Every structure is written in C-alpha cells, then in structure tokens.
C-alpha cells in the first residue's frame, strides 16, 4: 500500500555540549501510517521528537509537512500545523482537574462547560472513558495517559507523537490503547510511536526507523522482521540473557506481616495489609502500575516509614521500629527509584555518596571521622566492578548519565555483603547491556544467599529474574506465586485489569 | 473576663477593617506570586519601600492617590530586582527574599531622612451620603476611604481571575508543575516575572497605606513586621483569596483589640498584648506547616523551586 508522505525529515542534526544527540537523521511518515522509532535509551529518540514538536531547534537539516517546509519555533506552532504529542513523563498538573489540564494544552479552548462536553464525547468515541471534573492527582497512570491522548485528539491532529506510551500500562490497558491507535490510523492520523518494546512494535506498527547513538542505522518492516533482528539492529550487538544457578531455598530472611502505613507522599497510595516472606537465595518480584504503593513499600522496608516491631523481621529479628541505619546494620540494604535526590545526593561526589549508605556495613568511619582512604577505595571498587563510566570518583553524582549513576547506586548497595536487598526499578533508564549486567549482579547476590525484593514496572525483567511474583494494586499486595507457569493474562488480571475500561470497547464493538 | 464595656463593637469592626488593609493587599499580592510557584520573602522590604515612596510622592504632589500609585511603583521596582535574581540568575529564592527585606529596610531608612514629623495629605472617606448615617452598618460598611473598598474588590478580582480565566489557569499551571507547563510551550519565567511584579506592586501599595492612612506619618521601620504577617496569612489562607480576607480581618482584629484593651486598661501587661499578633503568626505557621496537615496539599507543588529550561 502506498501512502502520501505526511512528514519528511531530511538530514536533521542536533548537538549538545559533548554529545551528538542526532546526526543526519532522515525518514518519512505516510498519511495514516503507524511509524515506530526504535532505539535504546540515549539513542536520540526524544531529542528527535522534541524537534518535530518545536521544543528544540535542529542545528542542521530540514523537515516538511505535507510538502510544505516545516520548522516549528514553538510547540504552539507545531500544534497549529497538526502535530500533537503525548509525553513519556506526563505533562500534567496534579492539582488541576481533567478539563483544566486539557485546556492548557489547547490554543483556543472553548468555555469550560463546552470543553467538558467535548471531552466526554471524544472519550466515548475512542473508548477512553474519562470524567472531566476529576482531579488528575487522583487518577491512575493509565487514566492520566487518556487525559494526554484526549488533549491531543481534541485538536484533530494529523500526526500524533507517542513517547513510550505503554511503560505505565497494564497489558489490558495496552490492548485498549492499541485499539484506539488503530482506529485513529484508519481515520488518517499518522502516529509516530517511540518505544524499545519490540513485540508491541511488531503488532502495531507499519514501518520502523531504528536509531543508535543518534544515527539512523536502518529501517524495517516490523511485521516481516523478527524481534531478534530488530533487537540486534537496535543494540548493535548480541545479548546474552542472565544465567542463574539453582539454589535450594533457605531460611526466611525477610518477613513482612500485615503492614499498613499511610502514605507520606501527596496523592500517594497507603499500604494495606501487605504480607510476604523472602527466603535465603530467593528473588521476589513485585509488579504493578506506577503509583500503586511501590514507593511506600520501599519506604516501609528501608525503614524510612516505621511500623510495630514484629511486623518487619530481618533475618529473624524484629525490626519494624528500626530506622534506616539500624536496618542496614541488621543486614537490609535498599535502593529507591528516584536517583536524583532520594538514592543519591546529586551535588555530592561519588565518594561522598558511597559513604552515605556504605558507612555502616563497610566500616567507613572511625571515631566519628570519615575514613577517606577506605571510602575512596569502596567507591573505586564499585566503579570498577559495575563498569560505571565516569572521569573519576570525585565527580558529582548529578554529572553522571542516568544509566551510569544507576549502575553506581545499585553496585554501592550490592557490594555491602547484604543479607536482604530491596530495589525499586533496578534498570529504569538503563541501556540493555547495562541492564543485563545489573540483573546478573542481583542474581549473583541471591545465589550467595541474600533474600531479594525487586519492585519493577518492567514485567519482562521480573519474569527473567524472579522466583516468586506478586503484584501491588492500590496499596494491596497479591499473594506471591511462583513465576513458573504464570501467563501474561494472569499477570494482567493481578494488576487490576484495565481499570473498568473493557466496558466501553465492548459497547462500541 | 476582660472588660469589653468601653469598646464599641461598630468602631471596633470599622477600625479592624482599616487595620487589615496593608496586610491584606500584601498577602493578596504574595498569594498570586506563590500561586505561580515563587516564594518571595521580601514582602516586608517591598512594603516599607512602598511606604516611604508613597509618602514622598503624596507629600510632594499633594495627592494621596498619586501616593498610592508611587508606593505601588516602588514596590514593583524592588520586586524586579528579586525577579531578575531568581528568574534569570537562578539564585535561591529564600535567601534572595530575605536579602530583599534587609535591603528595603535600609533603603527606606536612607530615603526617609528628613521626612520625619511631616503630615501627609489626608485620604478622606468615600461620601456615601445618608448611607453612612445608618446605625451600626453605616459606621461599619460606609465610613471608609477608597483603599478599603479597593482591597475587598481585589480579593474578588483575584479570586475570579485565578478560578475562571485562562490567565489564572496558566498561573496555577506554572506554579503546579513548571516542567509540564514548559513542555506545553508556556514561558514559565516570563509568567513568573509578571506575577512577582504584581506582588511587588500590591505590597508597595499596602506599605503606602500604613504611612498615608494608618499612622499617618513617616517613621523608620514603620511596617514593623506587617510583611511577615502577610506571608503567614497566605499560608493560613491555604492560598485562597477569600480566606486571605478572613485571615487579614482576624489579624487586623487582634491588632485593634490589643490596642483597645491597652487603652481600656486591661490587667494583662501591655507587652503581652503587643506581642499577640506576632505570637499568633508564629503559632499559625507552626500549625499549618507541620507537614501532614491539609496545608501541605494545597500548596503549589513547584513553590520555591527555580525553573531552568534544560532543552
């Protein structure tokens, strides 16, 4: 099938100090085509779409939209010409309601009452039910994404850019999103779909452009290619899945009994009766859509939120009323999700950051003074073992790329001879090769006898490394089940299905 | 109980409305600034610069109205220093705000040399004719100068703008999540600049009301902490304009009441009475900002954070 060309990108380049984000990128999107932009984190996908959306100006090259020169100077110009974008990290305002959020993304919004009616109409039409008067802070991640999509649809876009739209959705919600996208495509709206999830691209997209280190390294028809071919084009190397040695289950290392705590985070989710155990050598994977209590669970395990003493037991000791330092002493290390500000002090050097959590278990202080040589040695050890790319151990944590800092922070925890490890999102924003290394390191610690809790939104990751699998949904933890024999459908249902969205599509079909 | 016999309630209410005007104007300005995500602790400095500038303008032109305009202009000019430092040089907002207050206090003291002991032109009550003669209500509602009515009008105006207009929506959006506002194409720093200037003008006008109507003369340090009370009222009001009105009247009421009690010869030592408004300010701030309260939820999410477009 030949299509008229909608967007033609020719020879686009963009450099930032020290990096070439995009170099001579060219591709074409046809009218109504679902076009995938495939690449690892840091391959330059986001910079490229920001240029199409007018947030960043290209250094070189030109674009044309429907045959006319297209050089948007601001997002409002791009929107006017029919380009809309759904962001990866949602550009939403939690304290405003749905209609207000939608109005902010439009050039000339109608009066609120009329807008609310139009939101209702469009959301029914595309099977994305949404109440315009609800506060965005109270919505689930899937519902928030609907707000973004509807904001775009109300402007009747010719090209809809979607930046990693499925990373926050349950499998059922992904199905519904794809139905909506196919409907849009059939109506003539082109979609530029950014992702690194190959199976999704193979089911949804008509064409794919693959980026690596800012350059186009190939294009493919995703329906004709195998996931392996696409992956190797994307990574530029063959990948080996982590290997694991079978270990016999040992004693219970971490026991959590009916923990209920109120969330200290605004719009957070409180934990309700969370119970589980992790044995020596066991990896418990906890899945769930973001915002269902993951951050709170980490706080409750790390000791930042305290409970009654016997509700949390580390290696048999009642530790519920222990703070983070006492829990470290008892053998539990924790790595939170937020790298800048929670896991690391961004403006402090890697050595200082190494000291912050390593002091207790690695004996890095003497008589109340910091033992600098030992701390430096510890930082260097982590940098060497986990292949952290940095000019040196004196560099501020902020200066490292997200993936590199993540390797350092995970390594810092894993190298403290822990008995219990709790990690939230171990490989978020890390490229495939580094992610594999981190997973391997986690499995090695488990093989050495640590009990591990991995909280992640990446199902493939959990299925790869976990022995037991549970789901957090609205602050409740499902009963852990062995990973062997679980199907994606079962997992989806454990994750809360599609949050009441099925009904709409059934009615429409 | 204390003796209230010598205090006439109509006079008390009328005078608390007057006492509340400076802190209400300043708090309303600061509310808009904070709604846009900026914490300007320089309110006291902007007020006192407005007080002296308004005083000088009124004395030299003979027009109290021009005095208020001058006060507002001076407050706005001082706030532009804050805006430039925090929005373009990305300095720390708390430190810059405190410095602004110290600077304002010094600057007003310097420019005020030679203006001690002068009486400014009188700002009279708005003539409501026979309405002012209604018993009780006439005294309470129809006996004031135009700035009292202006301040109430501004409460309504700011409430309406923030709630129902696109401008208000954009201001709230910028204060709520400046990264998201930027990615939608709004000029975060420019919008904040506008709000800071408006806040400065309101604070300056509030200051001018102190030196032109409340006192009315120039003395060093004339605002005596009114700017801090205004800051407290914004938090007390949970960033809502009508609650600013209530808060300002409560604090105005306490100020007037303690003066009246002093005059009535209350048994409580004078020092405690004059301390009362400040003690209550501290108390309110401690209670409201104790973290888990509702106040932490209604605060603009980007409050006090500088924005720098990274791409």
Image (cartoon, coloured by chain):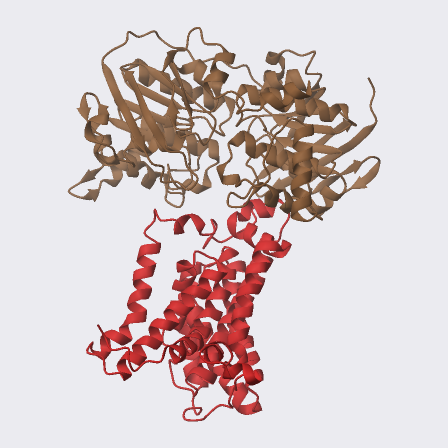
Among the 4 quarters of the image, the one containing residue A312: top left
In the image, what residue occupies the spot 52% across and 25% down? A499
User: Could you say where residue A295 lies in the image, as x and y percent from the top left?
Assistant: 39, 33
Vertical placement of A200 versus A63: above or below?
Answer: above
Tell me the quadrant of the picture where the C terminus of chain A can be found: top right
How far across and how far down the image is residue A17, in percent? 57, 43
Can see residue B262? yes
Which chain is brown in the rendering?
A
Q: Quadrant of residue A169?
A: top right
Quadrant location, the N terminus of chain A: top right
Q: Is residue A258 left or right of residue A149?
A: left
At which x and y percent is residue B126? 55, 83
Viewer-closest of A303 and A387: A303
Q: Identify by letter the chain in red.
A: B
Query: Which residue is pictured at 31% across the width and 30% down the height?
Result: A260
Q: Is residue B235 left or right of residue B67?
A: left
Direction front: furthest residue: B135
């Amino acid at each position: 099938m030949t299509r008229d060309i909608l967007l033609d990108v020719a020879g686009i380049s963009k450099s930032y100090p020290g990096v070439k984000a995009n170099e001579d990128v060219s591709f074409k999107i046809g009218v109504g085509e679902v076009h995938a932009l495939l690449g690892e984190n840091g391959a330059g996908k986001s910079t490229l779409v920001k240029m199409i959306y007018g947030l960043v100006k290209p250094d070189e090259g030109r674009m044309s939209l429907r045959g006319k020169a297209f050089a948007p100077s601001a997002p409002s110009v791009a929107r006017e010409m029919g380009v809309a974008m759904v962001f990866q990290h949602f550009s939403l305002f939690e304290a405003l309601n749905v209609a207000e959020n939608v109005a902010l993304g439009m050039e000339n919004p109608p009066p609120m009452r009329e807008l609310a009616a139009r939101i209702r109409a469009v959301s029914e039409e595309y099977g994305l039910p949404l109440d315009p008067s609800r506060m965005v802070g109270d919505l689930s991640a899937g519902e928030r994404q609907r707000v973004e999509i509807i904001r775009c649809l109300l402007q009747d876009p010719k090209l809809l850019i979607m930046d990693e739209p499925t990373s926050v959705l349950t499998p059922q919600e992904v199905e519904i999103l794809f139905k909506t996208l196919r409907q849009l495509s059939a109506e003539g709206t082109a979609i530029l779909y950014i992702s690194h999830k190959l199976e999704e691209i193979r089911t949804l997209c008509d064409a794919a452009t693959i980026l690596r280190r800012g350059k186009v390294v190939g294009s493919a028809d995703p329906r004709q290619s195998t996931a392996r071919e696409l992956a190797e084009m994307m990574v530029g190397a063959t990948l080996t899945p982590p290997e694991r040695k079978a270990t016999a289950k040992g004693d219970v290392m971490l026991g959590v009994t009916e923990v209920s705590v109120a969330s200290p985070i605004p719009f957070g989710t409180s934990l309700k009766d969370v119970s589980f155990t992790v044995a020596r050598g066991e990896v418990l994977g906890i899945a769930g859509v973001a915002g269902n209590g993951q951050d709170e669970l980490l706080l409750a395990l790390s000791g930042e939120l305290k409970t009654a003493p016997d509700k949390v037991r580390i290696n048999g000791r009642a530790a519920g009323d222990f703070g983070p330092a006492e829990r470290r002493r008892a053998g539990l290390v924790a790595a939170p999700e937020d790298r800048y500000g929670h896991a690391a002090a961004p403006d402090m050097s890697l050595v200082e950051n190494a000291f912050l959590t390593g002091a207790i278990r690695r004996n890095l202080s003497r008589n109340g003074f910091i033992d600098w040589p030992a701390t430096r040695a510890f930082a260097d050890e982590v940098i060497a073992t986990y292949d952290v790319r940095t000019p040196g151990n004196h560099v501020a944590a902020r200066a490292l790329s997200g993936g590199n800092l993540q390797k350092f922070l995970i390594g810092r925890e894993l190298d403290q001879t822990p008995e219990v490890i709790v990690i939230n999102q171990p490989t978020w924003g890390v490229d495939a090769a580094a992610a594999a290394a981190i997973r391997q390191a986690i499995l090695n610690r488990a093989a050495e006898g640590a009990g591990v809790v991995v909280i992640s939104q990446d199902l493939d990751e959990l299925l790869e490394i976990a022995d037991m699998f549970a789901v957090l949904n609205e602050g409740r933890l499902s009963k852990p089940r062995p990973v062997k024999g679980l199907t994606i459908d079962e997992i989806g249902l454990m994750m809360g299905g599609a949050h009441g969205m099925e009904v709409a599509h059934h009615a429409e079909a | 109980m204390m003796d209230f016999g010598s205090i006439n309630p109509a006079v008390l209410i009328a005078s608390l409305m007057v006492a509340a005007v400076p802190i209400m104007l300043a708090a309303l300005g600061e509310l808009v600034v904070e709604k846009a995500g900026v914490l300007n602790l320089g309110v006291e400095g902007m007020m006192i610069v407005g007080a002296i500038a308004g005083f000088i303008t009124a004395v030299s032109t003979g027009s109290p109205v021009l005095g208020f305009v001058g006060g507002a202009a001076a407050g706005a000019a001082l706030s532009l220093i804050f805006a430039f430092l925090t929005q373009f040089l990305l300095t720390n907002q708390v430190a810059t705000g405190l410095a602004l207050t110290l600077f304002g206090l010094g600057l007003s003291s310097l420019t005020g040399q030679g203006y001690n002991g002068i009486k400014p032109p009188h700002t009279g009550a708005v003539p409501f004719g026979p309405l002012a003669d209604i018993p009780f209500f006439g005294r309470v509602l129809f006996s004031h100068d135009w700035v009292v009515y202006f301040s109430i009008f501004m409460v309504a105006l700011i409430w309406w703008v923030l709630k129902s207009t696109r401008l208000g929506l954009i201001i709230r959006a910028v204060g709520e999540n400046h990264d998201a506002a930027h990615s939608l194409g709004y000029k975060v720093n420019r919008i904040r600049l506008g709000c800071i200037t408006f806040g400065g003008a309101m604070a300056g006008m509030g200051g001018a009301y102190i030196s032109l109507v409340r006192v009315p003369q120039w003395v060093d340090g004339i605002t005596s902490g009114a700017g801090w009370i205004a800051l407290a009222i914004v938090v007390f009001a949970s960033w809502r304009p009508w609650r600013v009105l209530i808060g300002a009247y409560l604090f105005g009421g306490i100020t007037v009441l303690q003066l009246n009690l002093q005059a009535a010869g209350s048994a409580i030592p004078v020092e405690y009475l004059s301390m009362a408004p400040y003690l209550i300010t501290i108390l309110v701030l401690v209670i409201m900002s104790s973290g888990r309260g509702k106040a932490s939820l209604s605060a603009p999410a980007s409050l006090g954070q500088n924005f720098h477009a990274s791409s």
